[in-house]
Image (spheres, coloured by chain):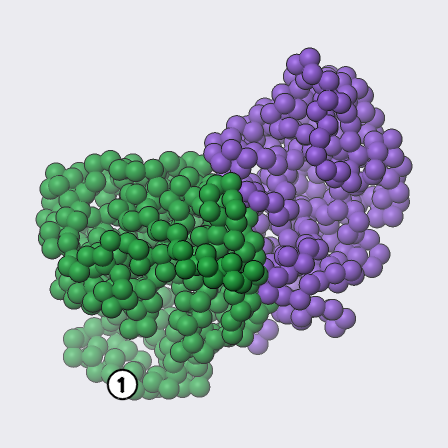
Amino acid sequence: MTQHNRAQTETFTPSGKLQFGIFFQGVNSGTIWKAAESGSQTDFESFRRIVQTAERGLFAAFFLGEGLRLREHLGRPHALDVVGRPDAQTMLAALASVTKNIGLVATQNTTYNDPADLAHRLSSLDLISGGRAAWNIVTTDNAWTGANFRRGGYLDHADRYKHAEAFVETAKRIWDSWETAKGPVRRVLHEGQHYTVDVTPRLPRSAQYRPVLFQAGDSPEGRDFAARQADVIFSAHPKFEAAVEFRKDLVARSLNAGRGANAVQIMPASEFILAPTAEEAAAKKEWVRSLQIGPQQAVAYLEQFWGRELSEYDPDGPLPEIDPVVEETSETRGSGFHGAKARQLADQWRAEAQDKGLSIRQFVTSKTARIDATFTGSYAAVADQLAEYAKVGAVDGFNISPWLIPTGLDDIVNHLVPELQERGVYPTEYVGRTLRENLGLATPVRSADEAAQAVRAL
Amino acid sequence: MSTTEDRTEAGQAGFLAIELDGAGWDGGDFASLTEAVLAAESAGFHAATFTDAPVAGRANALQRAAYAGPVTRTIALVPELDTVYTEPFHVSTQLASLDYVSGGRAGWIATAAEAPEAAAAVGRENVSGASLAQEAAAAIEVSRRLWDSWEDDAVIRDVATGRYIDVDKLHYADFETPADFAGAAYSVKGPSIIPRPLQGQLPVLAAASLVGQGEVAADAVDAVLVTAPTPELLAAEIRDVRSRLGASVAVIAELDVVLDSRGQAAAGRVAGAETGRARYVGTAAGLTDLLESLLTEADGVRLHPASLTVELDELSRLVLPELRRRGALRPPVQDGTFRDLLGLAHPASRYADSSTATAAGN
C-alpha cells in the first residue's frame, strides 16, 4: 500500500548499472562437490569465505534458500547431489557480524511460516544487520512438504498467491506499526481464510524502514504478485532478448498495479564460467558440466521421470527404450513433475535425443535449466555482453549461483568486476549503509489509510 | 538425554553463565552485542544466555546468539526458544544451524509460552496448564529426533559411486504427538534438512518447574534452571531438585545480581519489577563467597545482572578472578563444545545401529 505514495514514472529509465547477488544454493546439481577444491557445504568458514569475497566485489546481496523437506528419489532422499543446508535467517544473522555492507536475503515460505513470527524474525535480522535484510518470498502447495509441519496439509495451487499476498500485506502492516523508534505502536489484526493474526509488534523500523522484498515466481499470477508487492524480482530470464521482453512485461504489470515503471527491479538467476580466453572458458565449461551431471546423476534425472530404476542403462548410451511407470511419478516426489505426462514426455525425449545423437548424459546436461542462465567466455567478452544489458536496462543485475563453494566467486570478483567497472556499468563502492540504499530503492512511506484501519480495529 | 555414565567427572568446580539481555537492542546498535559477549567471554563466563521473553525492542534471541557465534571462541551461546507457538521443524533447524555458526557451542533453553498474546499472534488457541509441558516435551522430542536423523558421517562424498550422502545414514523421524496430547495433534516426518549438529545433540535446558513427573521427562533435558525466592533458599531448592530429577540432569541456580560499583551502593540501584529469582545485592566480595558456596551444590550458576555494563565490569574485575583463584570455576576451553562444558560425551545417533534407514516403505 505504501508504494502508492512513491513518485510515479510512466516511462522506464535504465539505471545504466548492474548489481550482483550471490545465491548459495546448498542443494541440487549446480554446485559441484567432486572437484578437489570443493569445500564444505555446512562449515561456517565456507559461508564466511564466500560472503566476504562477495563483499570485496561490492555485491549487493547474499541469498540463501529455505529447506522444508529433503528432495527424494524413488522414495528415499536423493543421494547424488549436494544436500543439507542451514536455516537461512540463523546463518544470515551470523554472517551479519562478519560483514558490513552486503544485503542478507532469506528465502522464506508463506505456507509453512506464521506471518507474525516470520515478520518478527525478519525485523530482527534487519535490525541486527543494520538495515541489510531482505525476504525472498516463495510459496509451496504440496502436502508432501507439509508432512514436516504442524499445519500439514496444503493449499490449492490456485489459492497460493491469494494466501501469499494476504501474508505479505500482514507482514508489511507489522513493519509499519511503530510510528517512531520509541512508539507508539499500532496493533495489527488480520482474520483470513488461512490464518488469524492479532499482535502488537515488538520491533521498531530498521535503518531501511523494513526488509527489502524479493519474489521469484514466474507464472502470470506470480508476476502480478511481484508487480504489486515486491521490490526486486528474482527472474528466470537471463538471455538478452528474453530479459528485454520480461522487462517490458514487468513494467506493464507494475504500471497496471499503480506503481512506477522503475518500481520493481529485475535480477535473473545466472551462472558464470569465465577464463582469460574464450578457449579456456569453453574447456572449463566442459569440465564443470561433467562434474555437475555425472553418470549417476544423468541416469537418476531420467529415473525421476520414468519412476523406476534405470541403473542398467549406460549413461553414455541412448535413452531407455523401456516406458515410464506412470503411477510412480505422481506429484509427491519433490520433483515438481506431474505423472500423467510421463509416457508422452519419454517418447518426445527419445525422439529428440535420437535426432541430435545425444547420449543419456549429453541429453540430461542439455535439459538442465541452467543452460540458458550461463555466461561463458573471456572476462572481457562477458563484460562487453553484460554492458549491453546495462545500457538498455534489460535487467538491474544478476543473481549468481556459484558452481563451486567456497571459491566460486573469486574469478568474478578478481577479473569480471574490474572489467565491468572500467566500462562504467558496475558500482565502485557501496553507495549507502542499507540494502535499500545500495539497490537504489525508494523508502516506503507510512500509510495514513493503514493508521485509520488500525485505529478502527482497536 | 545424559546418563550418569556419559557425564564425565567434572570435579568440584562449576561454571558461570550470564544473561546478556539488553545487549544489542537497548541502544539500537548491534555492535554493543559484540562488545557485551566478548566482555563476558574474556571475563571467563562459560555461557551466555539470550532471553526471548516478549518485550518491546528485543530482537529474536536465536538470532542474537547466532550473531555472537562468529566473533567468539569459547563461550557457549544459549538462546531461549518457545516450544508452544513455533514450528518444531524450524526450531530444530535453527538450533542445529546455531551449532554450526558457533563451532559447537550452542544450547537451547526450551520455554513454554504462557501469555495469551503469544497464542493470538499466530491465531492459535491459548495453551495453558499441563498442556504446556506436553507441547514442550513434543517439540524437544522432535528436535532430538531430527538432530539424530543424519548420522555424523552421512556426508560421504564418494566420487567412485557418485554419492554425496550415504542414504542408509539418513533416517525418518516419524514423530507423532501422543494419543493423550491436549493440543492439536501433529506429525513430523523428517529427515532434517541440515546434517547432524556438530555436537550431535545440543544440550537442552529448561526451567526446573517444567521438568519432572507429569511434566517434561527428566531424561529429555540436560540441565535445569532452579529458582528460589532468596539466595538463602537456593541451596535447599537445588538439593530438592536433584533428589527429584536424579543425578543425570545438571543443575543451574538462577541469581539476580546488583553490585556496589564505583562508590555507588548496590541498594541504591535496585530497581525494576520482581523477577521471582533470588537476588543478591551488595559487594563483590560477598557475591564471591555466595557463588563459591552455591557452586558446591549446583553445577553452575546463571547471573542476571541489573545492568550489563556496570555489573559485568565488576564481575570481571573482582568476582571471577577470585573464584578462579579459589578453584571454584572450571577453566574455559577454547574451541570446546557446550557438551564438553557440561561433561557430556558426543552421543551416537539413536538411529546409528538400527536398520530403519529411509528405505522405501519405512
Residue drawn at point x = 41 percent, y = 49 percent: A210
In the picture provided, is A37 more to the left or to the right than B341?
left
Note whether B174 is above or below B165 in the view shown: below
Q: Quadrant of the N terminus of chain A?
A: bottom left
Residue at coordinates 62% horizontally, 48% vertically from top-left?
Answer: B54
Q: Nearer the viewer, residue A307 or A12?
A: A12
Q: Colour of chain A?
A: green
Residue name at image x 31 percent, y 80 percent = A320
Return the x and y of residue B229 as percentages of the image width and height: 83, 37
State how many labels appear: 1
Chain B drawn in what color?
purple
Instruction: Between residue B281 and residue A158, name the one nearer to us.
Output: B281
In this view, the residue farthest toward the top is B263
Residue for badge 1: A347
Chain letter of the residue carrying label 1: A
Can residue B324 be seen at all in this image of the molecule? no
Eyeballing the image, is A44 above or below A13?
above
Q: The disc labelled 1 sits on which kind of residue?
A: Asp
Circle 1 SS class: helix
Q: Label 1 crowding class (10 Å Cα cut-off): few <14, some 14-19, many 20+?
A: some
Left or right of residue A377: residue B346: right
Q: Position of residue B63 (x, y in %)?
A: 52, 44
Q: Quadrant of residue B187?
A: bottom right
- Image quarter for residue A260? bottom left
In this picture, residue A226 sits left or right of residue A422 = right
- Which residue lies at the image location 59% right of the left edge and 35% below the top edge? B22
List x then y, in percent, for residue A94.
47, 41
Q: Quadrant of the C terminus of chain A?
A: bottom right
Taking the image as drawn, is residue B287 in sight?
yes
The correct choice, above or below, for A354 with respect to A259 in the image is below
Pick the residue in front: A264 or A39. A264
